[in-house]
């Protein structure tokens, strides 16, 4: 079974990608790095090649973003501490 969690990028003011086509483009990157897409880096700080553009949450997505962050954290913890 596979659970799909939207990337944090989907909630960012700078995201230009299309979740339905899996495009991974934003104002900072032509292709968003894997580390950011999978949630290992929240891109709240500078990242190599980001042209000084970091994650900026769209106000209307505040609640959804918080839920997704919890899901990402739970996933990372389950990988780090399998049962």
Image: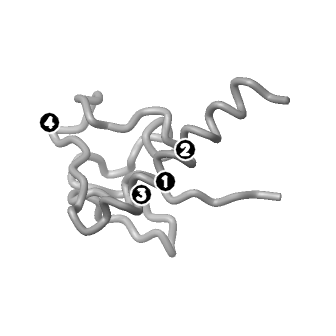
| Residue at 57% in and 57% down | 5
**Closer to the camera in the image, 45 or 32:** 45
**Closer to the camera in the image, 11 or 24:** 11
**Marks 2 and 1, how far apart at CA:** 6 Å
Is 38 located above or below residue 57 in the figure? above
Assign a secondary structure to mark 1: helix
| C-beta proximity under 8 Å, tags 2 and 1 | yes
Q: Position of residue 10 (x, y in %)?
A: 38, 61
> Mark 1 packing: few (<14 Cα in 10 Å), some, or many (20+)?
some
Q: Which mark is residue 24?
A: 3
**Marks 4 and 3, how far apart at CA:** 18 Å
| C-beta proximity under 8 Å, tags 4 and 2 | no
Quadrant placement of the C terminus: top right
Q: Which mark is residue 68?
A: 1
Q: Position of residue 20 (x, y in %)?
A: 51, 75
Q: Return the residue found at the far left.
A: 52
Residue mark closest to the camera, 1 vs 3: 1
Q: How many marks?
A: 4
Is 42 located above or below residue 71 in the figure? above
Q: Horizontally, is 33 left or right of 28 in the view?
A: right
Q: Earlier in the sequence, mark 4 or mark 2?
A: 4
| Residue at 63% in and 60% down | 4
**Marks 4 and 1, how far apart at CA:** 25 Å
Check disc 4 and report the residue beneath it: 52
**Marks 3 and 2, how far apart at CA:** 18 Å
Q: Horizontally, is 82 left or right of 79 in the view?
A: right
């Amino acid at each position: 079974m596979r659970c799909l969690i939207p990337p944090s990028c989907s909630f960012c003011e700078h995201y230009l990608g299309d979740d339905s086509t899996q495009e991974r483009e934003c104002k900072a990157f032509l292709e968003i790095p894997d580390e950011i897409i999978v949630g290992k880096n929240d891109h709240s700080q500078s990242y190599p090649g980001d042209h000084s553009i970091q994650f900026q949450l769209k106000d209307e997505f505040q609640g959804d973003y918080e839920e997704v962050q919890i899901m990402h954290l739970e996933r990372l913890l389950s990988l780090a501490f399998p049962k």
